[in-house]
């Protein structure tokens, strides 16, 4: 790594550290509506009323890699989706295609049950691993069988997906299931937008806790992300002005 | 019939079973998927064992390496017992190691792999793409970033919406974002079309081979 | 009290491993820091050791995956929600074990199973085309919004631009320009947003402000 890039990287990270420490609001800030987060609690009710399990897919989000944060925020969204559904006769199902994410899936399920004082109702088979297989098709293929085999009520697909997400969403649409989908890849987001009932685009998955958790301090992450957006825009403007000055100066 | 012929017939049969999904979700399709998942799991296990675990075990030649491997095995072993209630506290420690190291790798990767290169290339776009194109690229990047802004203002009536200027910029951002996602979707259709044509070609060739007595 | 101690301990582990790994990655070989660099260089060794450790742990979690696959499908085989689910679990377990046995037995059998896997994979990949076209049709029917319309325009630009017709050559130039300028801008905007969110979330996890594991959800 070139030394100037190294110094810039350090400065960016130090700035983010400082911003995260400084932004400590005790009252939640109002946030724009995101339909997927409005609908998510209703999916639990659907599951309870129909006595059919809710499915949450974490896809290829993996702990320990560059996808770690994606896995964590996906598990966060899963927690808020599962928590109200724990009283359903049909326990929710969490799937992943990464073996390192299985403990996180188990942890998320256990916390959701424990938060309702129902840890005894937790079943070990609720967290499932399906291998990704070539082009992640084994995992998505397995998800297409869940509506018929496990009679799931809806899909919440939050994690890493590519074009294979289309198979899962088409099968869900065929059965009339409600779907929420997102991905960290452009292809996954494009498929989610076209085919899911509610899609989370861009970085919307990362801001989920503030929408679903309803605790004041949870919005601090979103406020910090918003601050950095504007800082980044200002930096691009300054760099562009500098480049233009050089371009026309020479 | 030798093994390669058995393999070809099985491949053809499974292709038809998967395609039967087009007529409706059916038992045969789901059975084929179960076969696929089982095989994929086995191959994942074999590949991971052959290419990662076995070389690791073979590379242990000194005391330090053995201790290192033992610690890794201990952490993995702790994670294995996550479903057990009594061991849950202990396994969280192993999870914390994965999260701590993973968070650092993710932060470093986001800054050096995306933030710095894309910011630099956007700022240089007036030089690389031309003045007008450069400004359009800047407009697209900035408005797309603002399109996803979370914070808003509480309006009378309790509804949270963004200010009128932010909404205007966000509208431009939405146009850039949706145009991009649409194009990505179109490209995905094109590449999947290539695979579909290849599969139809395979089916026709297989049938022609049988009919032709090959 | 036990929960609080555990909570503090898990956070401490995340913070220590996170900060040491990040510091090591940032310092590199220390050459950018002049004379102080020599003192900082060991951080890089610690960081790469931690990353190696995690890579090995991830590989070893394969055992967890296999254990999960077998336990879930054995239970489903015995107490599955229906005959179809039981049958599918049985087929999955049999094909998994058969593949392992075949691998042990000979490479030829391995080839046979591998071929079957490849054929199913390609057939599924081909099915994606139908799913995507269905998705586009569904969008056209259901989502008459500005975003939906622009999305369809973006899709059509790429699809029409790919047609191998000489009359469409001027359109090809427009497609190239669109790909180079507005489409690239939109993609950069989305990717920069995700990178910023990853950075902020990661930093907050490393300094212990966001905790999304263990016995408490998110704290500050």
Image (cartoon, coloured by chain):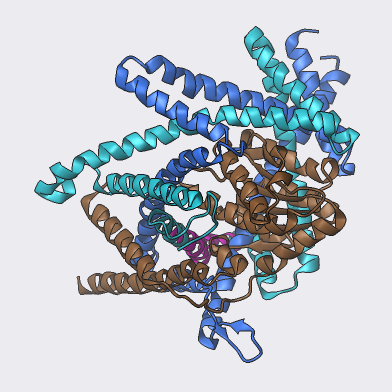
Residue most extreme to the bottom: B156
Residue C14 drawn at (x, y percent): 41, 48
- In which quadrant is the N terminus of chain B drawn? top right
Residue A74 lies, with reference to residue B81, above or below; the image says below
- Percent of width and height locating residue C184: 49, 61
> Which chain has been coloured blue in this picture?
B
- Against B66, residue B154 (above or below) is below
Q: Residue at x 53, y 49 (%)?
A: C214
Residue plotted at (59% across, 45% down)? A107
Q: Which residues are magenta?
A: C171-195
Q: Is residue A19 shown left or right of residue C55?
A: left
Q: Is residue B31 visible?
A: no
Identify the main secondary structure in magenta. helix
Picture quadrant where residue A12 is located: bottom left
User: Against A241, is A51 above or below?
Assistant: above
Residue C28 in the figure: left or right of residue A51: left
Q: Which is nearer the eye, C136 or B116? A: B116
- Would you say residue C205 is visible in this rendering? yes
- The magenta stretch spans residue C140: no
Would residue A127 appear left or right of B117 to someone viewing this image? right
Q: Position of residue C84 (x, y in %)?
A: 88, 34
Tell me the quadrant of the picture where the C terminus of chain B can be found: top right
Quick check: is C173 in the magenta stretch?
yes
Where on the picture, by quarter, is residue C200? bottom left
- In-image side of C73 versus B67 (left or right): right
Residue visible at 20% across and 74% down in the picture? A249
Kindly indicate which chain is depicted in brown in the rendered structure.
A
Q: Outermost residue toward the front?
A: C1
- The spot of residue A65 in percent (x, y) is 46, 43
Using the image as rendered, state which of residue A240 and residue C103 is in the foreground. Answer: C103
Viewer-proximal residue among C21 and A91: A91
The letter of the cyan chain is C
């Amino acid at each position: 790594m070139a030394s100037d890039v190294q110094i810039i990287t350090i400065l960016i990270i130090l700035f983010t550290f400082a911003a995260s420490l400084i932004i400590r609001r005790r009252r939640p800030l109002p946030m724009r509506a995101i339909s997927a987060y409005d609908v998510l609690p209703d999916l639990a009710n659907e599951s309870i009323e129909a006595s059919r399990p809710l499915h949450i897919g974490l896809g290829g989000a993996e702990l320990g890699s560059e996808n770690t944060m994606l896995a964590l925020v996906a598990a966060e969204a899963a927690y808020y989706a599962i928590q109200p559904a724990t009283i359903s006769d049909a326990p929710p199902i969490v799937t992943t295609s990464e073996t390192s994410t299985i403990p996180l899936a188990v942890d998320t399920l256990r916390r959701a049950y424990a938060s309702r004082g129902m840890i005894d109702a937790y079943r070990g088979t609720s967290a499932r691993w399906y291998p990704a297989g070539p082009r992640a098709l084994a995992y998505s293929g397995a998800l297409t069988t869940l509506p018929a085999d496990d009679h799931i009520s809806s899909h919440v697909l939050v994690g890493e997906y590519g074009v294979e997400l289309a198979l899962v969403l088409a099968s869900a649409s065929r059965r009339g299931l409600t779907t929420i989908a997102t991905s960290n890849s452009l292809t996954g987001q494009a498929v989610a937008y076209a085919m899911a009932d509610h899609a989370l685009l861009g970085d919307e998955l990362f801001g989920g806790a503030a929408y679903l958790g309803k605790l004041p301090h949870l919005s601090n992450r979103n406020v910090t992300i918003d601050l950095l957006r504007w800082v980044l825009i200002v930096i691009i403007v300054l760099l562009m002005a500098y480049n233009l000055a050089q371009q026309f100066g020479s | 019939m030798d093994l390669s012929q058995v393999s070809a017939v099985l491949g053809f049969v499974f292709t038809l079973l998967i395609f039967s999904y087009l007529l409706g979700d059916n038992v045969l399709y789901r059975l084929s998927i179960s076969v696929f998942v089982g095989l994929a799991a086995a191959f994942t296990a074999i590949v991971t064992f052959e290419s990662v675990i076995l070389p690791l075990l073979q590379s242990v030649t000194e005391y330090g390496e053995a201790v290192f491997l033992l610690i890794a095995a201990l952490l993995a072993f702790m994670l294995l017992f996550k479903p057990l209630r009594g061991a849950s506290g202990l396994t969280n420690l192993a999870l914390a190691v994965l999260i701590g190291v993973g968070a650092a790798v993710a932060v470093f990767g986001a800054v050096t792999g995306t933030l710095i290169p894309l910011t630099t290339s956007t700022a240089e776009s007036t030089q690389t793409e031309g003045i007008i194109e450069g400004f359009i690229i800047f407009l697209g990047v900035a408005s797309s970033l603002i399109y996803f802004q979370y914070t808003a203002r509480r309006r009378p009536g309790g509804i949270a919406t963004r200010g009128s200027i932010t909404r205007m910029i966000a509208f431009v951002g939405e146009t850039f974002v949706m145009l991009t996602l649409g194009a990505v979707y179109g490209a995905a259709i094109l590449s999947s079309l290539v695979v579909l044509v290849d599969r139809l070609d395979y089916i026709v060739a297989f049938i022609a081979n049988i009919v032709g007595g090959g | 009290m036990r929960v609080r101690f555990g909570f503090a301990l898990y956070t401490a582990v995340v913070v220590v491993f996170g900060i040491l790994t990040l510091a090591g990655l940032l310092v590199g070989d220390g050459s950018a820091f002049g004379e102080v660099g020599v003192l900082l260089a060991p951080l890089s060794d610690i960081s790469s050791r931690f990353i190696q450790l995690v890579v090995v742990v991830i590989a070893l979690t394969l055992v967890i995956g296999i254990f999960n696959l077998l336990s879930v499908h054995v239970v489903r085989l015995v107490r599955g929600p229906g005959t179809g689910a039981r049958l599918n679990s049985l087929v999955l377990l049999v094909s998994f074990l058969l593949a392992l046995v075949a691998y042990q037995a000979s490479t030829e059998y391995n080839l046979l199973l591998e071929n079957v896997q490849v054929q199913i994979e390609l057939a599924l990949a081909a099915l994606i085309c139908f799913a995507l076209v269905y998705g586009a049709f569904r969008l056209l029917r259901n989502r008459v919004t500005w975003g939906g319309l622009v999305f369809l325009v973006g899709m059509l630009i790429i699809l029409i631009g790919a047609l191998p017709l000489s009359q469409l050559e001027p359109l090809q130039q427009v497609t190239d320009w669109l790909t180079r300028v507005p489409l690239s801008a939109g993609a950069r905007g989305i990717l920069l947003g995700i990178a910023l969110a990853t950075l902020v979330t990661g930093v907050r996890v490393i300094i212990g402000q966001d905790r999304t594991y263990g016995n408490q959800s998110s704290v500050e």
